Image: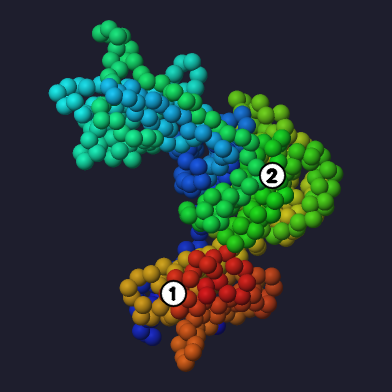
Amino acid sequence: MSSTTPESPADSKSGLRRGAYPIPLGSLTTAGFLGRTERGPVNEPISISSFPEYGRYFGGYLADGAVAHAVHDFFAHGGRRAVIVRVANRARRAALDVPTADGLLRLEARYPGRHEVLRISIDYEQVERDLASFNLVVQRVSAGGNRLVEDQEIYPLVSMRESDPRSIARVLAESRLVTLAGPIPAQRPLATPPARPGDPVRYVNLTVPGDDGDALTDYDLIGSDRDGTGLFAFGRGPRIDLLAIPLLPEIELGTTAFVAAARFCERQRALLIWDPPAAWQSADAAMLGSRRLDFAHSGVMTYFPRIRPRGARARQGGGLPACGAIAGMLAARDQRGVFGRDEDADYTLRAAFTPVLSLSALEAQRLARYGINSFVQATGGLARLVGRVTLAGRALDRRRLRAFLLNSIEDAVVDGMSDHDQGGALERAEWQIRRFLDELHRHGALRGQSPSQAYFVEARQAAANIAPGIRFGIAFSEPGRFVEFTIDLAGVRAGRVQKARGLEAEQILS
């Protein structure tokens, strides 16, 4: 095979059709965070691109939760896209009973939790003569005594008539704060004007406060594949490359949830970043704990010790999970190309963070042999993550390169089959894969001095009882030693791609 970059289908003399595009070498890595949050939708994957955006959906820091800390640290260390899944155990929605002339109009908070402190006001301005209409203002206020307004929704000209385009059922269907929770009375809600001109507006406050529910269990975190809850809620959102389940030191991830998360990540070709147990109080304890775990998995990485932020968030004596900071470091590195040299990546904790314990370089080397990454002090007093190994003791960058490569090829082929131009699909896919692997080889990502030692790509034309497809091999570990994969284009057309996602076996699209 030639080492030159393959020609574009648009310019090829072989008559390839237009529509193929080079597979990008960079990667916008998506990190998934699962756990307890202050508020927000439950078991719904929400994609965000900043920590302020997280706050708009899920609130702030919790005394008994660590997701907000981890998400903050992810963006602080270079992450750009995250998906959040809130889980809860028997959490309850707050309720408001709004008086009407003939009974009560019951509203509920859209999402459960004690931090959904809501109130509403009613007035009849501009609708005095329409006895079925009113204006509605819904506010979320802080839980403290200052009643700071955190969010507000205004609904003018709301109608009690179900057939009206501005019926209360229709307008509240779009609300992020409240929802209807009972039958609609015939009469409109009573107004809540000030007692005297110039006085503050009066409000209808909560009748039943919300509740955060009980402590999370392994079963809440795992959820249901059938219902798309817990871990499996990520399957209904953008594909994630990294997964974190941030917990405070006194709340550990159970073995059942740990194994389920590792297997879920294996299916998704994602990496689980596992926070160390509270029992790991020293390097020796961490090594002993790793041996007792008896679960060496190449799709999991862990570290020691936890980190402690300086300043207002430093109250957690046992430290906070570093999964968010590590995910941000990995995502920042991916933006420069997952094929880059690992020593060029920035794995330094920001100055606002410090490890809860100091480790020596010798201790870090020993921990790496047990599949544990370490935070050690570097030049300038900052801490740097060293080791870059999976829990199985294998090189982290090679494992992540494999996932990136297969995901990129899969996405390109799926996109190429989704348009109306089915002609030339085999040639387009072959060109894309060959060009992609050639570029990766040029950047030193694949083993072998020549392309023929690093990869091969073979197209399989349609024949009797044989569907068109592509067979390719990649030298991940040593030159000429190929891990082989096949792509069945008929399988792509039949919509069976989703079932194959995450497979690390011989076929990825079949």
Left or right: 259 as drawn, with respect to 155: right
Image spot of residue 505 (x, y percent) = 63, 72
Image spot of residue 119 (x, y percent) = 39, 23
Q: Residue at x 38, y 69 (%)?
A: 418
Left or right: 94 as drawn, with respect to 364: left
Q: Which of marks 2 and 1 precedes in the sequence?
A: 2
Left or right: 189 as drawn, with respect to 474: left
Left or right: 392 as drawn, with respect to 93: right
What residue is pinned by disc 2?
Answer: 253
Q: Residue at x 69, y 70 (%)?
A: 477
Question: Among all residues in the image, which is located at the extreme bottom?
Answer: 464
Q: Secondary structure at mark 2?
A: loop
Image spot of residue 288 (x, y percent) = 84, 48
Name the amino acid, label 1. Answer: Ala
Circle 1 packing at 10 Å, graded few (<14), some (14-19), many (20+), is: few
Residue 287 in view? no
Tell me where residue 315 sits by quadrant.
top right
What residue is pinned by disc 1?
Answer: 494
Q: Depth check: 341 or 306 in front?
A: 306
Residue 466 in view? yes
Question: Among all residues in the image, which is located at the extreme left?
Answer: 129
Q: Depth check: 298 or 101 in front?
A: 101
Q: Quadrant of the N terminus?
A: bottom right
Q: Residue at x 34, y 28 (%)?
A: 105
Name the amino acid, label 2. Answer: Leu
3D distance between C-alphas at marks 1 and 2: 39 Å
Tell me where residue 415 sits by quadrant.
bottom left
